[in-house]
Amino acid sequence: MTLTQEFDTIAAISTPLGEGAISIVRLSGANALKIAGEVFRGKNLEEVASHTINYGHVFDQDTLLDEVMVSVMRAPKTFTREDIVEINTHGGIAVTQEILQVLLRHGARLAEPGEFTKRAFLNGRMDLAQAESVMDLIRAKTDKAANIAVKQLNGSLSVLINSIRQEILEALAQVEVNIDYPEYDDVETMTSQMLIEKTAHFQALLTHLLATAKRGKILREGLKTAIIGRPNVGKSSLLNQLLREEKAIVTDIAGTTRDVITEFANIGGVPLELIDTAGIRETEDIVEKIGVERSVKTLKEADLILLVLDASSALTKKDVELLKLSTSSHRIILLNKTDLPEKIEWNQLPEGFIRISALNNENLDAVEEKINALFFAGSMDAKDATVLSNARHIGLVEKALAALTEANAGLAAGLPVDLVQVDITRCWQILGEITGEAAPDELITQLFSQFCLGK
Ligand SMILES: Nc1nc2c(c(=O)[nH]1)N(C=O)[C@@H](CNc1ccc(C(=O)N[C@@H](CCC(=O)O)C(=O)O)cc1)CN2
Ligand SMILES: Nc1nc2c(ncn2[C@@H]2O[C@H](COP(=O)(O)OP(=O)(O)OP(=O)(O)O)[C@@H](O)[C@H]2O)c(=O)[nH]1
Ligand SMILES: [Mg+2]
């Protein structure tokens, strides 16, 4: 049984400030019931059963403030592990603020941002990764991002990190045993061999976890997708089709799109940040020239390139150049205008192109399927996989992996075991910062300060 820490009683409005049906003012701490009882007229809150909701009125001295429902939850089975009282008021800025103010006058202290969740963490109800997931969940913009966060709230990442840390600890303990009780003369060699295998194993685990970070980032931020091609091949028409909306101007004049246009589209649950670019060609037009330069830059920064070619004309020098320029990245080649007689030389194209007609909305499903296959290879449906998505966690796993890589290389180069032990211990320490087991106070203060008020 963990003992909770003693803190003063805090209060805050836990719902968004605005006109709504109901707002909640929350109290947490040893005096929550006493303070609420002083302003509430109805049943005696200090006597009602735990986890009940109670009807009554809130008064400021003799002035009636609101008709309310009050939830009473006694420690330790609560979100913060302290006594919690939640006053459900009529949603409205003035009423809710007034009730908060009267609670403050009766001895509660205004909570800092994230302080309820911070107490849940400090009182051992959840670890740091779980607490952070509360914020990730609130900020999630798509259902898939929310799905990652709620799994983390349930402890999936913490369980994984804890088990890796435990394995590392066991390996380190084995080193101690070998050193203290050398049964064989070549104990140093044996220990070193064991650690080479172990560190390689841990490297594999962390590398695997890091690989999920890319997916997490895409789901959170969207996939930067550049639509490129020479003028007039149908890039803007494709953008409009994927958006199912006439966003970009389409004309038969080459050089219609002068600047980069960015729009978000939801393609099979994957948020795409679609970037329509100015057709790439040599040009003397100064405005178009800047547009073309930006297109080339966009192409270099994109996660995905949709290279559009005109199937109704023979390949041009520019097409060939663009094919070369875009090979290194994730690229899908689209042969557009297949509704017209085709003149493009198929045999000069790399395999895997898709024939479409942006004009007639033909075969765009195949484009969506290909995007999913390229980035998620079926893994979008792997609902139970733990995904790294929080930037702080990604950074720490990278650091932990670097420490292991150093250890492994050191062992391979014949460094003494006790030197390498330092790196492995550091890796264990760094991973502990994810769950908060080895997190410095300043970090904790800073993390929770980014929360919203009342959380
Ligand atoms: N009204 C209200 N709704 C809310 C919250 C809240 O604080 N108040 N939450 C706040 O984020 C979320 C729910 N999260 C919660 C998490 C744990 C406990 C809790 O009491 N845990 C106890 C076990 C309770 C039981 O099993 O009966 C515990 O862990 O000991 C409550 C809420 C979302 N909805
Ligand atoms: N037949 C046919 N015409 C198309 C197709 N897609 C686009 N077009 C036409 O091609 C012309 C150019 O289309 P846009 O979408 O403006 O081409 P773009 O690549 O954005 O051109 P720039 O912005 O100038 O680089 C327009 O007249 C479109 O209607 C298609 O699939 N079939
Ligand atoms: Mg265009």
Image (tube, rainbow, N blue to C red):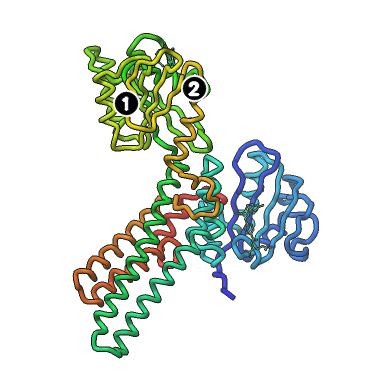
Looking at the image, residue 90 lies above or below residue 84: above
User: Between residues 240 and 118, which one lies in front from this camera angle?
Assistant: 240
Query: Which quarter holds ligand 1?
Result: bottom right
**Residue in the image at 49% along x and 35% along y:** 369
Position in image of residue 260 (x %, y %): 36, 23
Looking at the image, residue 408 lies above or below residue 295: below
At mark 1, the secondary structure is helix
Quarter where residue 109 is shown: bottom right
Q: Earlier in the sequence, mark 1 or mark 2?
A: 2
Quarter where residue 196 is shown: bottom left
Number of residue marks:
2
Position in image of residue 311 (x %, y %): 37, 18
Question: Mark 2 — residue?
Answer: 241
Position in image of residue 152 (x %, y %): 52, 55
Looking at the image, residue 388 lies above or below residue 319: below
Other-residue count near label 2 (Cα within 10 Å), few / some / many at <14 / 14–19 / ≥20: some
Does residue 443 appear to the left or right of 315 in the view shown? right
The reply to whether the residue tagged 2 has its Cβ within 8 angstroms of ligand 2 is no
Question: Mark 1 — residue?
Answer: 347
User: Between residues 327 and 8, which one lies in front from this camera angle?
Assistant: 327
CA–CA distance in space, label 1 to label 2: 28 Å
**As shown in the figure, which amino acid type bears the numbered disc 1?**
Asn
Other-residue count near label 1 (Cα within 10 Å), few / some / many at <14 / 14–19 / ≥20: few
**As shown in the figure, which amino acid type bears the numbered disc 2?**
Gln
Q: Residue furthest front?
A: 347
Residue 439 visible? The answer is no
Position in image of residue 132 (x %, y %): 49, 54
